Image (cartoon, rainbow, N blue to C red):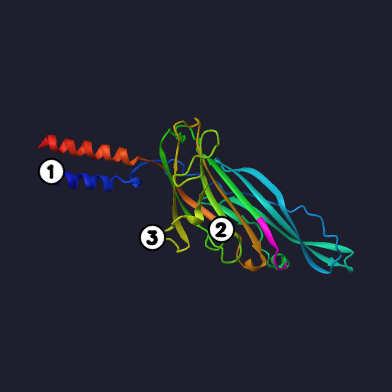
Amino acid sequence: MKRTSLTLAFLVATLGFSHGQILIDGSNYSGLFGPSDSISVTPTTDPPEDGLLGIEVVLDAAETQTATLGNHWSATATGAAQAYLSVLDGALYVPLSGTGAEVALAGSALEFNVDNDNDTLLGALGTGVGLSLAWSATATFDDPGEQLLLAPNTIYQVEFYVNGNDGLLSSTLGLVPQFGIELLDGNGQAVGAVEGGSLVDILGLELLGIIGSPPETKRAIAQFRTGSSVATGPAGIRFTGSALVPATALGLGERFASVSNLSVTQVPEPSALMLAAFGFAAGLRRRR
């Protein structure tokens, strides 16, 4: 009996959540983050009208660009700004550099970027003023024969590498960052997260180090649970992010966050693991 109990405990420990059925990874969606492509917001602002001398920045938080990226992603970038130089005592404004939110596929990663990191533009924002940027990218797993079809009452675990220590994973520069992930059913509706709600806050996850990777690259794990019924059709995931970029972010760089090495696993319920372990242990006893 003691040996059987030890065998049962060993099975329950080793058949944990990480040993579920892998549904999506690099083996069946090797081109998920390619080919290289991007969309970015181009500011369409009018010059300021106050007649002040020097460099002024006109913010356009509502300017939006939406497009399809690669074979699986639909993306939206929001927010832009344009710097102007006042000349002739404010009678004429000359456009200088502009910047805006950018969503990009880099071949091996999804990136949330700023398409032009211009120190002159950020430096002219002034105290208490920030550039509002937002990003959204949705992948639908609909390849023939490899569709992600969700089952009722099932836990799904999404794992990915994330790099964002200088942007959406850091609030030390006054960025007010937000960065989240959702699992979407066949109707594009968000599935409930195991910990509650539907949007998993990546900033609140315990990010894990990765052997052989730079220290700023971490592994994130999020779990979702379907209800008693779930919409049919190919499922997907959605990453969203936003930030308020102040003048203190000078020299931050153009990349605010990147996601790579994504996988989706169907996780056995603990009760299913126990039943499997008991069945295995019963089989051992019969052999004796």
Residue ID for mark 1 = 1
Compared with 164, 282 (above or below) is above
Q: Which mark is residue 211?
A: 3
Q: Count every numbered label the image shows and give the total.
A: 3
Tell me where the magenta segment starts and ends, as one range: 126-132
Q: Nearer the viewer, residue 50 or 165?
A: 50
In the rendered structure, find residue 67 and report the number of the disc placed on it.
none
Q: Amino acid at mark 1?
A: Met
Of label 3 and label 1, which has the lower sequence position?
1
Q: Quadrant of the N terminus?
A: top left
- The answer to whether mark 3 and mark 1 are in CB contact below 8 A is no
Q: Are marks 3 and 2 in contact (CB under 8 Å)?
A: no
Kind of residue indicated by mark 3: Ile
* Image coordinates for residue 264, horizontal then vertical, percent: 43, 43
Q: Is residue 37 magenta?
A: no
Q: Is residue 191 left or right of residue 8?
A: right
Q: Residue furthest left?
A: 288
Q: Is residue 213 above or below residue 11?
A: below
**Front label number (1 vs 2):** 1
Q: Are marks 1 and 2 in contact (CB under 8 Å)?
A: no
Mark 3 vs mark 1: in front:
1
User: Which secondary structure, mark 3?
Assistant: loop
Query: Which corner quadrant of the image does residue 252 belong to?
Result: bottom right
Q: Nearer the viewer, residue 282 or 150?
A: 282
Number of the front mark, 3 or 2: 2
Label 2 sits on what residue type?
Leu
Q: Could you classify mark 3 by the number of other residues whose Cα lies within 10 Å: few (under 14), some (14-19), or many (20 or more)?
A: few
Disc 3 to disc 1, C-alpha distance: 40 Å
Q: Where is residue 271 drawn, in percent x and y? A: 31, 39
Q: Which residue is mark 2?
A: 168
Quarter of the image for the C terminus: give it.
top left
Q: Residue visible at 49% across and 35% down?
A: 143
